[in-house]
């Protein structure tokens, strides 16, 4: 890139931040920061992306504010046409089993549901969630592994939470949108296809320092509704949904256009992450949650309790 091309790109980015960023006051400061360096950025696209991202995040640490470098050229963006993005997301979901990496029953009648790489839009994965929860609905306790969940879409969070709740809807984390100056509410669903796990049996959610965005939203809603116990590490801390803008064949800006608002806390996990109820390392999160789940199953009776006691006696092997 030439220096004039870099300057023009930075000016376009400043306009996007000023017009779209969810916090107008911070947007003005970020724009001023970019303007102060507009003629001094490197011309190498990868180096440019690194330095501009640092300046975008310098005011308030918003991890969704980024200039991303792509080795492969980005397709042209057509305003109002989301078909290409939707098709790419659908292919990604297809390759990754809709984000459900595993659904299995552990000894002691404890279910394990692994979610990675992201919580895909509900329209793409509704049948996958229905199948996974129908499989695990009978277990006495459930562990949801979000340690490798790096993001997600709000519709998927509300659908997933619906399988962990009952038919009476509960209000979840909504989104304040700068464009409308209103909070768009989110609720669990009164009806879901397949079987629910429900809201009464033990639930454990695993987190790591890599759990981000939509994965954090699910953990936060589980915690704030009192539905379950979060086990593991404090999450990464990204609560601002973003939009992407192609500024160059190899450079894409992401701008936070909304912020999460939880009806219980009145705030979100931005920058601070979701703090676990049971803090441990990411590696120990599953063994810790499994032992806790087995102890709860043991408190019951019947074959499941006997199997759980046997699993604990064996050291709860995984």
Image: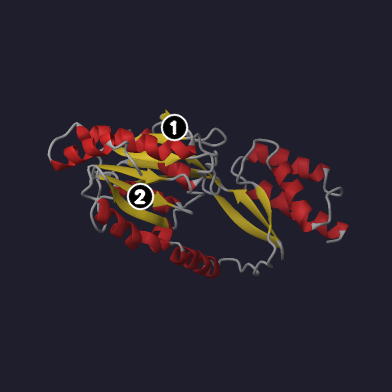
Residue at the image point whose x is 14% and y is 42% from the top: 303
Here the colouring is secondary structure
Q: How far, Cα to Cα, is label 1 from label 2?
A: 18 Å
- Earlier-in-chain disc, 1 versus 2: 2
Percent x, y of residue 187: 34, 46
Discs 1/2, front: 2
Dot 2 crowding, Cα within 10 Å, few <14, some 14–19, many 20+: some
As drawn, 302 above or below 193: above
Q: Position of residue 189 (x, y in %)?
A: 29, 50
Q: Residue at x 72, y 52 (%)?
A: 13
What label sits on residue 287 in the rendered view?
none
Residue 227 appears anywhere in the view: no
Q: Position of residue 163 (x, y in %)?
A: 29, 49
Crowd class of label 1 (few under 14; some 14 to 19; many from 20; radius 10 Å)? many
In the image, residue 193 sits, relative to residue 277, either above or below, namely below
For residue 38, side relative to residue 217 (left or right) = right
The image position of residue 106, as x and y in percent, is: 29, 47
User: SS class of the residue under badge 1?
Assistant: loop
Give the residue number, with chain letter if any, for mark 2: 113
Are dots 1 and 2 in contact, CB under 8 Å? no
Give residue 58's quadrant in the image.
Answer: top right
**16 in relation to 233, above or below:** below
- Mark 2: secondary structure: strand
Vertical position of residue 190 compared to residue 316: above or below: below
**Residue 191 in the figure: left or right of residue 246:** left
Horizontal relation, residue 63 to residue 122: left or right: right
The residue under label 1 is 276
| Residue 119 in view, yes or no | yes
Which one is nearer the viewer's eye here, 196 or 289?
289
- The quadrant in which the N terminus is found is bottom right
């Amino acid at each position: 890139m030439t220096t004039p091309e870099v300057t023009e790109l930075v000016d376009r980015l400043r306009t996007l931040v000023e017009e779209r960023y969810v916090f107008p006051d911070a947007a003005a400061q970020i724009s001023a920061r970019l303007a102060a360096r507009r003629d001094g950025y490197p011309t190498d696209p990868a180096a440019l992306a690194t330095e501009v991202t640092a300046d975008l995040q310098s005011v308030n640490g918003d991890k969704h504010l980024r200039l991303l470098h792509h080795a492969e050229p980005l397709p042209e963006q057509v305003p109002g046409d989301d078909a290409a993005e939707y098709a790419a997301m659908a292919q990604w979901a297809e390759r990754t089993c809709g984000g459900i990496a595993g659904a299995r029953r552990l000894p002691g009648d404890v279910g394990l549901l692994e979610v990675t790489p992201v919580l895909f839009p509900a329209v793409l994965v509704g049948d996958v969630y229905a199948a996974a929860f129908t499989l695990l609905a009978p277990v006495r306790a459930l562990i949801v592994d979000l340690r490798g969940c790096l993001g997600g879409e709000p519709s998927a969070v509300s659908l997933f939470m619906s399988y962990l709740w009952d038919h009476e809807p509960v209000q979840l984390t909504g989104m304040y949108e700068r464009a409308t100056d209103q909070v768009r509410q989110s609720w669990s669903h009164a009806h879901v296809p397949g079987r629910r796990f429900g809201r009464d049996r033990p639930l454990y959610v695993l987190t790591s320092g890599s759990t981000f965005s939509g994965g954090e939203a699910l953990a936060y809603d589980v915690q704030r509704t009192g539905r379950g116990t979060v086990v593991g590490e404090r999450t990464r801390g990204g609560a601002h949904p973003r939009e992407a803008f192609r500024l160059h064949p190899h450079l894409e800006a992401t701008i936070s256009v909304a912020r999460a608002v939880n009806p219980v806390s009145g705030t979100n996990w931005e920058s601070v992450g979701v703090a676990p109820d049971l803090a441990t390392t990411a590696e120990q999160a599953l063994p810790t949650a499994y032992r806790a789940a087995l102890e709860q199953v043991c408190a019951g009776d019947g074959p499941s309790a006997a199997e759980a006691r046997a699993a604990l006696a064996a050291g709860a092997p995984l």
